[in-house]
Amino acid sequence: MKTHQHYVPQFYLNNFTDNKGLLHIYDYKHNRYFTQIPRNMCFEKNLYETEWQDANPKLGKYVLPNNIEDIFCAYEGQFAKLLKIIQKVCIPQQNPRALILHTAEKTILFKFLINLLVRNPVNMSAMGIDKLSDDLKNNDEILIYKEIMDKMGFGGGDSIVLASQKKVMLTDEFKGGYMEYFFDMIKNINYTFYYAKSGEYIQAMCRYVMEMIKQYQGIISRVWLLLWHLKY
C-alpha cells in the first residue's frame, strides 16, 4: 500500500530540482532555506484513505485502500505526457507559436489543475470532505443499506458512505462531482505558458484566477498548499 500520498505530484516537483535531484525551498513561515527530495515534500501519510469505523476487523484498516491514490496516478500519467510536449515546444529553438493544445489536451490540462485544487489538505478540510453531511446521515436508502450491513456482520456503513463522498469530491468518476463542476467553469478561459530561460523560477498564486472565480476566493486563495516558493 502506498502511504506517502502527495498533494503535489512528485513528477511535477521533479521539474524544480537541481542537478542533484534536490528541491531548494524557502519556508517563509519560519524564514529558513533547506533542501529536500521531492518524495519528502508536499505529502501526508494516508491522506486520501478512509478508516473503517465500527466495522468487522477482517475488513482491514481502510476502505478500498489506495483507490483514490491510484485514480490520481492515472491523472498524473496523462498530464506528465502532456507536460513533456509543452516543455519541448517551449525550448528557445522552437517556434513560440507552435504550442496549440487540442481539445483533448486542454481537457487533460484543466482537469489536472482542478485535481491540484481539490486534493490538497487545506481545501479538503474547507470542503468538509471527512464529515458526513446531514443529508447523507438521514438518507432513507443509505440507512437501509447500513442496517443490512450491520445484520450481515460487516458494519462500517458510515465509513463506506464517507469513502464514497471523498471519491465524488476528489475524482471525475461520477457525474455531477466537484471536478466536473469546476471544469465547466474554467474550460473556456484563456491561458499562457511562461518559459524561464534562466535557472531560477518563483511560483506564486495568480491574482487573475482570484478575480475570475471570486465566489470561491476562500478556497482558491489557498489552492497552492505549497507554503513555500520553490527556487533553484
Image (tube, rainbow, N blue to C red):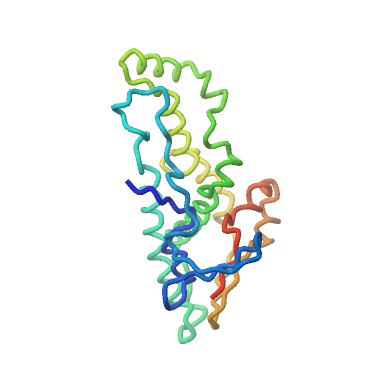
Pick the residue in front: 173 or 40.
40
| Figure disc tally | 0
Q: Residue at x 35, y 40 (%)?
A: 65
In the depicted structure, whether residue 4 falls above or below residue 199: above
Q: Position of residue 139 (x, y in %)?
A: 50, 19
Establish if 95 lies above or below 107. Answer: below
Q: Position of residue 21 (x, y in %)?
A: 42, 72
Q: Is residue 93 above or below residue 56?
A: below
Quarter of the rendering containing residue 230: bottom right
Q: Residue furthest left?
A: 58
Q: Position of residue 62 (x, y in %)?
A: 37, 35
Residue 68 picture quarter: top left
At 53% from the left edge and 28% from the top edge, which residue is drawn? 132
Q: Position of residue 183 (x, y in %)?
A: 53, 50
Camera-nearest residue between 148 and 85: 148
Q: Would residue 75 be found to the left or right of residue 126 on screen?
A: left
Q: Is residue 125 left or right of residue 43?
A: right
Q: Nearer the viewer, residue 52 or 95?
A: 52
Residue in the foreground of this view, choosing between 129 and 74: 129
Question: Measuring 55% from the left and 83% from the top, which residue is drawn there?
Answer: 198
Above or below, comparing residue 87 to residue 66 in the picture:
below
